[in-house]
Amino acid sequence: MSQKITIIKGDGIGPEIMDATLRVLDHLDLNFSYDYQQAGLAALDVTGELLPQDTLDAIEENKICLKGPLTTPVGKGFSSINVAMRRHFKLYANVRPVVTFEGTKARYSDIDILTIRENTEGAYLSDGQTINEDRTVAESKIVVTREASMNIVRYAFEIAEKAGRKKVTAVHKANIMKTTSGLFLEVAQEVAKEYPEIEFNTLIVDNTCMQLVMNPEQFDVIVTTNLFGDIISDLCAGLVGGLGMAPGANIGEKVAMFEAVHGSAPDITGKKIANPTALMLAAAMMIEHLGFVEKAHRIRNAIKATLIEKDRLTGDLGGSAHTAEFTDSVISRL
Ligand SMILES: NC(=O)c1ccc[n+]([C@@H]2O[C@H](COP(=O)([O-])OP(=O)(O)OC[C@H]3O[C@@H](n4cnc5c(N)ncnc54)[C@H](O)[C@@H]3O)[C@@H](O)[C@H]2O)c1
């Protein structure tokens, strides 16, 4: 029976990079069928809703979703549809690997860092956001729970163990945010004791950022709360040549959703110059999750070879090719 995958092309460059990624998947004889659904601004245009029930139902049924980026207005307007979906499907683990690819503008030659970000609570949700009438005082609430902290830290250690990784670093700000970040740190220290064979350390988030820029080789798996994970994973993407190179997975008990770390890139939308690598790498994570480990390696190796040979690269990678030409180049190496 063919595996049905919910496809959400998304906003901005989403449709451009999704079309490129599906072309790659189509060359791998995976016997997938695609269930196209809409979310975000594209859905609003067609259905009048940002997150239609049909989309939620399809994801629930198919259990696997490949998603393009969705636009969220800055400072005003609707709340993030990404956050709504992560919450709705309890996608508690946001997994963001970065690996150096030879031939890119990466700052270091041997980065291999996995950021595991708690995805369902914390400061990033901006629950209870209020601002007074004269816009002089704004508030929001941060909730961190023992259960979610335990789940995410355990997930990080389990994935480290499975992948043969050596070290987990819990990143926090418990010196200042003594209750919320303090609880996360306390739980991380407790869970770490269950995995004595894996090295464990803790670092304050501001120091982590400095260390990542100065001496990133010391990091292996980073586990942290929602907002810090959002920021740190973009920093990590910067270490390996930018957002165009960084994939992500949102994992829950029943549903998994795969996407690029980057956003809808309104500044280059429609120019056909977007780098589809991050979404292609997210698709590789997705098929690996589904058990197609060797085919996932084929995608990564084809991208690797394309970058090394600098064949038809997009502008952010130092070339001048269009998205479709870069995709032809990757497909020729599959
Ligand atoms: N998971 C998601 O859906 C997601 C993630 C981040 C941001 N967003 C949304 O995306 C919108 C734009 O956000 P932003 O501008 O801060 O970040 P962005 O990631 O869209 O863009 C940042 C910069 O990186 C470039 N860039 C991003 N992806 C690229 C690619 N594939 N190829 C080449 N260049 C690329 C852009 O052109 C831009 O200069 C916002 O509405 C934001 O909320 C969505």
Image: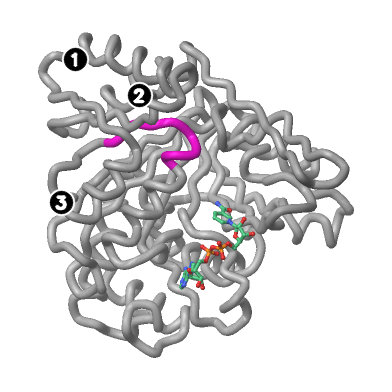
Is the CB–ligand 1 distance for label 2 below 8 Å? no
Q: Is residue 150 visible?
A: yes
Mark 3, residue position: 215
Magenta stretch: give its range: 222-229
Decide if residue 287 is in sight here.
no
Looking at the rendering, the quadrant in which ligand 1 lies is bottom right
Label 3, secondary structure: give it.
loop
In the rendered structure, the answer to whether residue 300 lies left or right of residue 74 reads left
**Residue 155 — which label?**
2
Tell me the element at label 2: helix
Say which residue label 1 marks.
195
- Do the residues under discs 3 and 1 have CB atoms within 8 angstroms? no
Q: Is residue 311 above or below residue 227?
A: below
Identified at 47% across, 64% down, the residue is 21
**Circle nearer the viewer, 3 or 2:** 3
Q: Position of residue 216 (x, y in %)?
A: 18, 50
x and y percent of residue 235 in the render? Answer: 35, 54
> Which three-letter amino acid code belongs to the residue tagged 2?
Tyr
Coloring scheme of the render? one colour
| 3 vs 1, front mark | 3
Please tell me in which quadrant of the rendered image residue 182 appears: top left
x and y percentages locating residue 22 in the rendered image? 50, 63
Q: Is 43 situated left or right of 325 in this image?
A: right
Type of amino acid at the residue the image marks with label 1: Tyr
Give the mark, 3 or 2, whose residue is nearer the N terminus: 2
Mark 3 or mark 1: name the one nearer the start of the chain.
1
Tell me residue 81's x, y (percent): 69, 45
